[in-house]
Amino acid sequence: MIDRINIETPQIFSKHGEQLKTASSVQKEFSHLLKNAINNVNESQKTSDIMTEKLVKGENVDLHQVMIASQKASVSLQATLQIRNKVIEAYQEIMRMQV
């Protein structure tokens, strides 16, 4: 009997017989990875803000830990911005290519 072919998500196999990922599955994985990375940056920013607020209110918070959290948040945000800039540069370079 002939099996039904699913055109929307075809299964692609390599020369060695292992199943390769489809473009949509790779796109979903990349989207999930990007969301997690941005959420991690956001969480580090929130943690830094909370610790700074506690320090300002005079609560029992170690100054060193507040400064470390602040620097972690700053470095992660700067890294995210640099990655974004590189992605935009790559996109612009691709758009300049002539077919």
Image (spheres, helix red, strand yellow):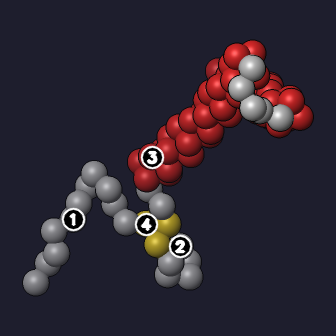
Q: Quadrant of the N terminus?
A: bottom left
SS label for mark 2: loop
Q: Give whichever of discs 4 and 3 has the lower sequence position.
A: 4
Residue occupied by mark 4: 12
Look at label 4 and name its amino acid. Ile
The span from disc 4 to disc 3 (Cα, nearest Å) is 17 Å
Q: Nearer the viewer, residue 83 or 57?
A: 57
The span from disc 1 to disc 2 (Cα, nearest Å) is 18 Å
Q: Which mark is residue 30?
A: none
Look at label 2 and name its amino acid. Ser
SS label for mark 3: helix
Residue occupied by mark 1: 5
Q: Do tag 3 and tag 1 residues touch (Cβ < 8 Å)? A: no
Residue at the extreme left of the image, as rendered:
1
Q: Residue at x 45, y 46 (%)?
A: 28
Q: Which quadrant of the figure has residue 38?
A: top right
Query: Would residue 67 be found to the left or right of residue 43 on screen?
Result: right
Q: Which mark is residue 14?
A: 2
SS label for mark 4: strand
Q: Residue at x 23, y 60 (%)?
A: 6
Question: Does residue 37 lie above or below 83 as drawn?
Answer: below
The span from disc 1 to disc 4 (Cα, nearest Å) is 12 Å
- Residue 84 visible somewhere in the drawing: no
The span from disc 3 to disc 1 (Cα, nearest Å) is 22 Å
Of circles 3 and 2, which is in front? 3
Of circles 4 and 3, which is in front? 3
Residue occupied by mark 3: 28
Look at label 1 and name its amino acid. Ile
Question: Does residue 94 lie above or below 18 as drawn?
Answer: above
